Amino acid sequence: MGDKDKEKSQPLVKIGHYILGDTLGVGTFGKVKIGIHQLTGHKVAIKILNRQKIKNLDVVSKIRREIQNLKLFRHPHIIKLYQVISTPTDIFMVMEYVSGGELFDYIVKHGRLKEHEARRFFQQIISGIDYCHKRMIVHRDLKPENLLLDSNLHVKIADFGLSNMMLDGEFLKTSCGSPNYAAPEVISGKLYAGPEVDIWSCGVILYALLCGTLPFDDEHVPTLFRKIKSGIFPIPDYLNKSVTSLLCHTLQVDPLKRATIEDIKKHEWFQKDLPAYLFPPPAEQDSSIIDTDAVAEVCQKFGVSEQEVHNALLSGDPHDQLAIAYHLIIDNKFEDEAQKFSIQDFYRVSLPGGNGSGPSPTIRPHPERITTLRDRFLAPEVPKNSGPATNTPMKRAKWHLGIRSQSRPVDIMNEVFRAMKTLEFEWKAVNQYQVRARKVNKVSGHCAKMVLQLYQVDYKSYLLDFKSIQDEDPTPRSEPKDAVGHHTMEFFEMCASLITQLAR
């Protein structure tokens, strides 16, 4: 019997809803295997950690810290943790499957990168680290070996085992991380706040991307430490003045003089070709608009209702199988779409992780602001013969019934769903931003119907618009005038009850 026949004859190994496949790698604490989610068919990476081994190696707190921190994150350039499955002997971390290998191997293979490619990687890294720091997490072990690449060569920051939570007024002292990428204050055992050590590591990584070598390197560790503490490193002639100034600012020995994330974001070299999705406005960060297609796929594969999926997503339970399946579908949908679009365009188009920076075509600009929005955002992206980007005069509405909000789109829609559930409305989601709802008057028996549509009225502001479905109906009415009046009053009563509930 051949090897292939043996493989076929071996029984399938399952953990939870996943079928274990080939081994991707073997580390100090255990193996990483490919997993296939049974119902969606999507690939994941499953890190298998032996409980006894991590206990013997005294890394229980390291593993716990990595799990706790990854649970907090949902960013396109940070590795995703979908689920943790525990057994008496092992811990299974179900994570995003990334097929492109380490950034370290990419640098080794290609040598120094072209400036535009190095910039793209660096922009993605800084975006991910900025996201961490804003959530009070410092990585402390940034290096190319911990930066993975997906099939589209997008960075995924991984290995948060040495990360730590920053607390106001407190400093860290642990000397950790790889010596070549460690900041002077870390190897000197001095106190540090946290973000500045990640900035130093990012500076070393940028140098490695641009030069194919390290700024501070020596096989003799004490000599290496002396070089790091001196802050003196070679600057090749081929580096232009702009990127050299950025390197010198990030590799300042004095942490008080070192660049901050904001300094890097404002630097002219960093700003060039900067995708807007990497640093979305605060009001739009972390929004994850519910994808109705993904919800439908979960319903079909699990045999559940849309409401059950919505409840699972709103519950925030990381172990809920419906929520896990939904996120797997969304993330794989992102990978498929990324093949067709550049990543920044994809985020503008569908907001899978909520990091869109401009108005998405799926969020319809309100008629009152559509001309302004067209000039600011849509003109370069929408074909000449379609939608708001044409020179067709736009009808300006005189009156609007709705609620203005500067909340994130996902928060607005989630609040709407909760309010409708409390008020016992019946509804159907037409798409991420439009809901058709109805409410039966128990006394009169009349059924009031309405459309809720989320519009983007300017860069950071949204309008939840209410519209009576009767007003949309093009067929002639055969009802008497007083019946139509009843419908109108019930529509306004429906609006009032929803507004009151949302205001609580």
Image (cartoon, helix red, strand yellow):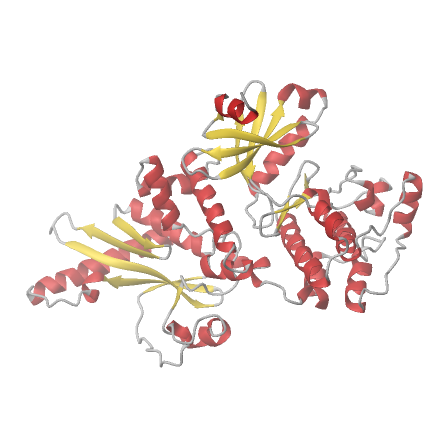
Q: Quadrant of residue 436?
A: bottom left
Q: Residue furthest front?
A: 1
Q: With respect to residue 20, does 145 lie above or below?
A: below
Judge left or right: residue 28 versus residue 381: right
- Residue 498 seen in the current view: yes
Q: Quadrant of residue 260?
A: bottom right
Q: With respect to residue 353, does 281 lie above or below?
A: below
Name the foreground residue: 220 vs 406.
220
Q: Percent from the top left, x then y, of residue 326?
A: 43, 42
Q: Percent from the top left, x then y, of residue 317?
A: 46, 36
Name the foreground residue: 173 vs 78.
78
Which residue corresponds to the image point at 80% horizontal and 56% vertical from the top-left? Answer: 211
Which residue corresponds to the image point at 48% horizontal and 21% vertical from the top-left? Answer: 11
Q: Percent from the top left, x then y, of residue 112?
A: 77, 56
Which residue corresponds to the image point at 47% horizontal and 33% vertical from the top-left? Answer: 319
Judge left or right: residue 425 versus residue 135: left
Q: With respect to residue 265, does 299 lie above or below?
A: above
Judge left or right: residue 439 versus residue 87: left
